[in-house]
Image (cartoon, rainbow, N blue to C red):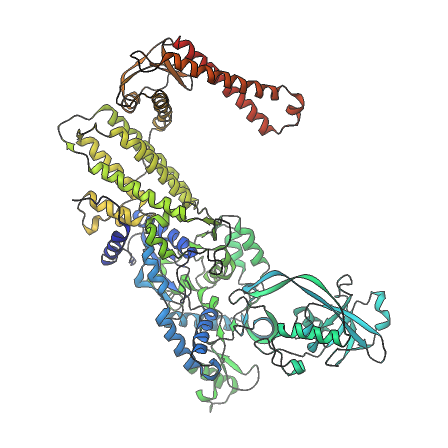
Amino acid sequence: MTIPAQFDAKTIENKWYDYWMKNNYFHSEPDHRTPYTIVIPPPNVTGVLHMGHMLNNTIQDVLIRRARLKGFNACWVPGTDHASIATEAKVVAKLKAEGINKNDLTREEFLAHAWEWTDKYGGVILDQLKKLGASCDWERTKFTMDPDMSASVIKSFVDLYNKGLIYRGYRMVNWDPEAKTTLSDEEVIYEEQQGKLFFLKYKIEGSEDFLTIATTRPETIFGDTAICINPNDERFTHLKGKKAIVPICGRVIPIIEDEYVDVEFGTGCLKVTPAHDMNDKTLGEKHNLEIVDIFNEDATLNSFGLHYQGKDRFVVRTEIAKELEEIGALAKTEIHLNKVGTSERTKAVIEPRLSDQWFLKMEELVKPAIKSVLETGDIKLHPKRFENTYAHWLNNIRDWNISRQLWWGQQIPAYYYGDGKEDFVVAENIEDALALAKEKTSNNSLTTADLKQDVDALDTWFSSWLWPMSVFGGIMDPESPDFKYYYPTNDLVTGPDILFFWVARMIIAGYEYAGEKPFTNVYLTGLVRDKQRRKMSKSLGNSPDPLDLIDKFGADGVRVGLLLSASAGNDIMFDEELCNQGKAFSNKIWNAFKLIKGWEVSETIAQPESSKVAIEWYEAKLQQTLVDIEDNFEKYRISDSLMAIYKLVWDDFCSWFLEMIKPAYQQPIDKTTFDKAIEMLESNLKLLHPFMPFLTEEIWHLIADRTAEEALIVSTWPELKPFNASLISDFENTIEVISGIRTIRKDKNIPFKDAIELKAINSENISTYFDTIVTKLGNISAFEYVSAKVDGALSFRVKSNEYFIPISGGNIDVEAEIAKLTTELVYTQGFLKSVQAKLSNEKFVAGAPEKVLANEKQKEADALAKIATIEQSIAGLK
């Protein structure tokens, strides 16, 4: 079989992915094996692959491929999320570009456009994941708006409503004026922004006096319905019971008293705008104040804004400040830092707004989710420190606003049969709703034409919180064979930014509907940042296209590059050089394979002792590494697992093992050693396969002709066996001996082809097991143990053992060597003197940190040892 000179990632990636798909290795069906299940965090249906997806899905693929090799029935369910706000915004923008206004369409017409958009652009990201090597069970691909998935969402809503957990309420909500929908508290990001504090003058009715109010939002004065003072504030005793006049609009409003007012903030007076501030609404209810809503749904002012009607709130803020100044109602402005709520999806500044919405009571639902993570440990977060974030969210949970003023999504299954707010029933379909409405009203003449379904859609998270159950049909049919076999799943890999939005809610839903956890482990990845620690974004131009990276470095190279820097929960400082490192690793493995396959094999020559020793050592080293790998996987240190394999293959296999067994130039290798080398290479490929699937499958099939049943993807993970740890520690000393020999050869310009003698005083009785390795790799003509120092020889130490290379035969210029060593001795003595001067300085010793002091003492010890060795070398040369 001809082996290409270079590893060509582009050629083999398509070849092996097609082969895996053709042989259906990714698909899983329930059987006698233990299942290992992962559900993908469903990306937005309109999304494209970015670096965060690359990291997250590479980790999932590593876990699923390893589980497959370990004999589990591995099932990785892919899919996409309908992402109501993001997708609807894209469809609205597309329609706008075509001159179509969403408001001119019926719901059905708009949804037709949305489905057309989804069919055209949706799922692109799943195809892109295939380029990465993701071994998902594509036959199980799900979309959160699939009919069965939507049915699960509706069934869940009806069930929770019937349990008394879902209710409709008129509340102050977070309004996104760009998406024109409400958001839950968790979808609001609070950012510190620099703005202004405006000091406004309100005249006191019936006098020339005025009071001053400090506000960050002068445009909201049109909604003011009271001024509030603290009853204990003596500065305003004279205002009690009076009324004030709102500037510009001239509305007369009462001056009320409440201890809620902070006497230290601003002027100590507070304007009360119940329609546009949560705290003001509470005050308004307490004091029975009028509510004046001044905003349209897009945050432009309505008719209450008088001549500012139709203008955006931020435009009005600038313009009204000028008008207030012109009429003498603006006392001053100050720069002010303020925390501003912004939409997690659209980045628009959130507007508090009173609205009828649907809510889910969370107080009781959340309890099993708190217990399973924070008390029993049934569910483990990796890294554990995220438990604090989890606890903060769940211990302070509020009712979940689950309705959205959108059309793209599952329509709320509430059906109105009258004009009153309570004139509705909740049912899975209109036929059931009609039966309930007839029963509720005792009006048997009602028809479906009399029912009007709620126009709002459900929050996207209300569908994705069912994901681990609904993908296996567990909501619609809890006795489904798939659900009973695959649920609960094993591992969830996601980002900490959706720990509450999605992870906690899935846990809540799991206990509510299945009575058990949805997964056992949650691996929280960090954010992928650039090497300057900046978050990757299109605007900064620092986010590379993952497909370009794969094209440049190969999928395996990119996977390795990402994972080498990806410790759990920590942000990844991404640098393309990491992918280059991954590509170099691919080439290293490829060249090692080519080297082995290039050897001529002889069935007649005997196995050298050095090869026998090398094999025993590498088998022990592989087993030791396997122990480390298993431990790291158990602790979800995926990066550390890869690094252990990386070092094993690059350092131990390529740099040492192959050198130890390599036959002499143009000589054959014995078959016993060759077969073992192939066996060790195959073990390496098995360990590497979850991380580098394409390269390893290619080499696996180049080693030998394999049937589909013998493919690497369905091979077996190396078995843990007992090993001799002393072999590994003894070889560390051997490495130092070989390094000492190579250093002398380099320093003295002794070519490797020239054999040299080696003598040693073994004062520590260190194992001589690797002497044949030292002899081979040092090109030693004779290796002898002696009882005394060897005169006329160069020497070096490894621990307490001293090694000598006799210099007879004119290998070096003795006089020049003595001169060189003398120069080095004088320098080292001078260095020692400076260190000892520091250590004899009482002031330095008394004030220096313990670590610094220990460092200086180590310098002294090292210098003394070096001086002794140099002096011995000089003495041996004289």
- Give the side of residue 150 with respect to residue 754, left or right: right
Q: In this view, does 873 lie above or below 591?
A: above
Q: Residue 378, position in %: x, y?
A: 47, 51
Residue 508 in sight from this viewpoint: yes
Q: Residue 246, position in %: x, y?
A: 75, 78
Question: What residue appears at the point 85 percent right and 75 percent down from the top-left corner?
Answer: 209
Residue 717 in sight from this viewpoint: no
Q: Residue 415, position in %: x, y?
A: 49, 81
Q: Which quadrant is the C terminus positioned in? A: top left
Q: Is residue 854 above or below residue 42?
A: above
Quadrant hosting residue 749: top left
Q: Is residue 417 above or below residue 10?
A: below
Comparing 76 with 73, the one in front is 76
Q: Which quadrant is the N terminus positioned in? A: top left
Question: What residue appears at the point 30 percent right and 43 percent down from the top-left corner?
Answer: 587
Comparing 406 with 361, the one in front is 406
Comparing 542 with 565, the one in front is 542
